[in-house]
Image (cartoon, rainbow, N blue to C red):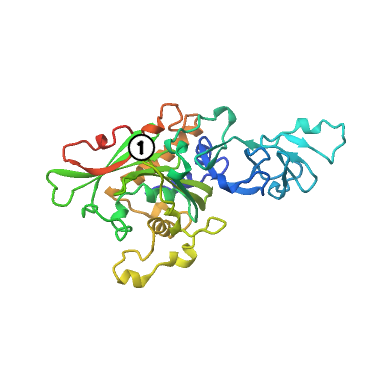
Amino acid sequence: MLTREENDLLTQTGPGTPTGELMRRYWLPAMLSEELQADGEPKQLRLLSERFVAFRDSSGRAGILDEGCPHRGASLAYGRNEECGLRCIYHGWKVDIHGNIMDMPSEPEDSTFRTRIKHRSYPTHEAGGLVWAYFGPSELKPAFPDWPWLSAPDSDREINKVLQECNYAQGLEGSIDSVHSDFLHSSDIRGRPSDHRPRLEVEDRPYGFRYGAIRRPDGEAGKSQYVRITLYVAPCYVLIPIQRRSDGSEVVTHHAWIPIDDEHNYFYSIRWNRRGPIAQDHGAQFAIDAEFRPERNRANKHLQDRALMKAGNWSGIMGVNSQDFAVVESMDPIYDRTREHLGSTDVAVARFRRSVIQAARSVSAGGTPPGLDGGTDFHCLATEERVVPIDMPWQEVAPFS
């Protein structure tokens, strides 16, 4: 269990908090590219407990600014998006994607006032169907992460963005936990060993850590082992094992949790078929509305079906990710980790917490966040699950991580 101070450090990501400052040192997915249209409606954007406005200018460039107009704070989300800038409807001040004040029609014509003001703007980068943003100190901006799926054709990639009503860490801890699949997802995931007590071994890596969940295969316990390797990549990514299907597809899945505030996050499910087009069907289980809120949510107890449970379904909730949402949202928006009791199969969860807490404290003391020293090759981050000889080291199952 964590102390209350450690729990606060792990879960608080607002301005000035240690983990908030850690998060701001990375490029983060801010929104889907399709949410912005050239000269279209500006979008209010709340991330890391701050308010921003996002827009696509007349040239098609995405920009993210502080939401309040630099004049008197009216929301630029109400502004006119025209001629490569946002014009505030209050007094007509106009700002471009870089925070330059383009026009002050309320000031004297010969005024140089606008040249002496700069609105707060944030670097953006569009890749892989996402608008990414960097919210940290400009002089410390890292290289953009070279995830291999970023260059994949749109037809080979599916990205879903879903509002989750809990702290980011709860969602991430659910994904980093291989053991719960044997129970929570048992009605949906078939073909795994019946050994529900895996041995977990964790290995720190420059980007975070990886771990192997090692089980005894049915009928071959003395000769083989079933190994499932999962990666945590700082600050908020989990890479789960490749899904190989009978149609020849190889689906790589990355999950990300981007804090909105301390009690909400945006969950991104990024799926990429390395062998060709992917079925664009994963998002159907969420049935999201215009605000990315899923149909199944805490207010309706995630539409849990007790009759279905009596008929043999374990959770009574349809959809693997919806099942994950149900349990992590059921803990309250910020779970009090001083009350829990971790067991031997919770070592990856404990390592995630330790990793974030140590990194946050290090950054507060002037250190470099994990994975930002230039040594991480994102093309070599490998996951895997398969049956291998019992004497084979689990690290060799996915040797390039």
Q: Quadrant of residue 240?
A: top left
Circle 1: is it few (<14), some (14-19), or many (20+) Cα within 10 Å? Answer: many
Percent x, y for residue 268? 47, 48
Q: Image height check: is 225 above or below 192?
A: above
| Viewer-proximal residue among 349 and 302 | 302
Instruction: Judge left or right: residue 177 versus residue 294.
Output: left
Q: Residue at x 59, y 34 (%)?
A: 123
| Viewer-proximal residue among 344 and 109 | 109
SS for dot 1: strand
* Three-letter code for the amino acid on which mark 1 is drawn: Phe
**Outermost residue, left direction?**
222
Q: Image height check: is 265 above or below 130?
A: below
Residue 49 seen anywhere in this rendered image of the structure: no
Q: Residue at x 30, y 56 (%)?
A: 189
The residue pinned by badge 1 equals 209
Residue 220 seen anywhere in this rendered image of the structure: yes
Instruction: Judge left or right: residue 390 versus residue 160.
Output: left
Q: Say which quadrant the C terminus sits in.
A: top left
Percent x, y for residue 183? 29, 58
Percent x, y for residue 383? 32, 40
Percent x, y for residue 351? 35, 41
* Numbered label tally: 1
